[in-house]
Image (cartoon, helix red, strand yellow):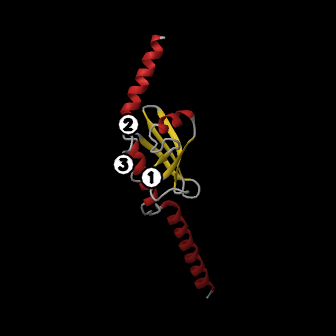
């Protein structure tokens, strides 16, 4: 009887180890994140050609977004809701460079906002940024 008991304990331990190994090394299936996809789509629509390097949830439905293009980086908080209509979002840039680029894309003259369904949505493409930085570099070389 003790041999059977030892065999069952050994089999149970092997089963537990197999389950832990599977949990450790098998990929975790994940469904699509609709909220993240919406944020990435809106950023890509407003800033075509920029690569979304990171879009992670931060606080109360807000997202931390980092986009890159030709050595330039814009990082900001994308805050949907919070007193705005459905589909509208506040933008909170984290530095002066990001502020200068996003201010031109705002749908509001006073605040940095993106409306969900604007009549006209300003855009700032990666190609525009490359051209702008090339002109600035050329002007610095002349000085």
Who's the residue at 45% across and 52% down the image? Answer: 39
Instruction: Judge by depth and name the residue closer to the eye, 102 or 31.
Output: 102
Position of residue 89 relative to residue 105, above or below, is below
Cα–Cα span, label 1 and label 2:
17 Å
- Image position of 55 (left or right of 48): right
Disc sitting over residue 39 in the figure: 1
- The numbered mark, 1 or 2, whose residue comes first in the sequence reads 1
- The numbered mark, 3 or 1, whose residue comes first in the sequence reads 1
Who's the residue at 49% across and 11% down the image? Answer: 143
Cα–Cα span, label 3 and label 1:
19 Å
Element class at badge 1: helix
Position of residue 60 relative to residue 97, above or below, is below
Q: Outermost residue toward the top? A: 143
The image quarter in which residue 4 lies: bottom right
Q: Outermost residue toward the right? A: 2
Cα–Cα span, label 3 and label 2:
19 Å
Q: In which quadrant will I find the N terminus?
A: bottom right
**Mark 1 crowd level (few <14, some 14–19, many ≥20, 10 Å Cα):** many
Instruction: Judge by depth and name the residue closer to the eye, 96 or 81.
Output: 81
Who's the residue at 40% across and 37% down the image? Answer: 124
**Mark 2 crowd level (few <14, some 14–19, many ≥20, 10 Å Cα):** some
Q: Is residue 33 visible?
A: no
Which residue bears the numbered disc 2?
125
Which residue bears the numbered disc 3?
119
Q: Position of residue 135 (x, y in %)?
A: 41, 21
Q: Outermost residue toward the bottom? A: 1
Q: Position of residue 17 (x, y in %)?
A: 56, 68
Q: How many marks?
A: 3
């Amino acid at each position: 009887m003790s041999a059977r008991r030892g065999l069952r304990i050994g089999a149970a331990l092997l089963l537990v180890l197999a389950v832990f190994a599977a949990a450790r090394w098998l990929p975790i299936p994940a469904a699509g994140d609709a909220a993240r996809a919406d944020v990435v789509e809106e950023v890509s629509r407003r800033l075509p050609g920029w690569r979304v390097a990171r879009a992670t949830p931060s606080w109360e439905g807000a997202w931390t977004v980092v986009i890159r293009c030709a050595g330039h980086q814009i990082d900001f908080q994308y805050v949907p809701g919070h007193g705005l209509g459905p589909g509208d979002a506040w933008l909170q840039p984290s530095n002066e460079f990001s502020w200068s680029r996003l201010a031109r894309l705002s749908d509001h003259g006073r605040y940095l906002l993106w409306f969900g369904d604007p009549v006209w949505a300003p855009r700032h493409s990666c190609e525009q940024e490359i051209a702008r930085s090339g002109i600035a570099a050329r002007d610095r070389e002349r000085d």
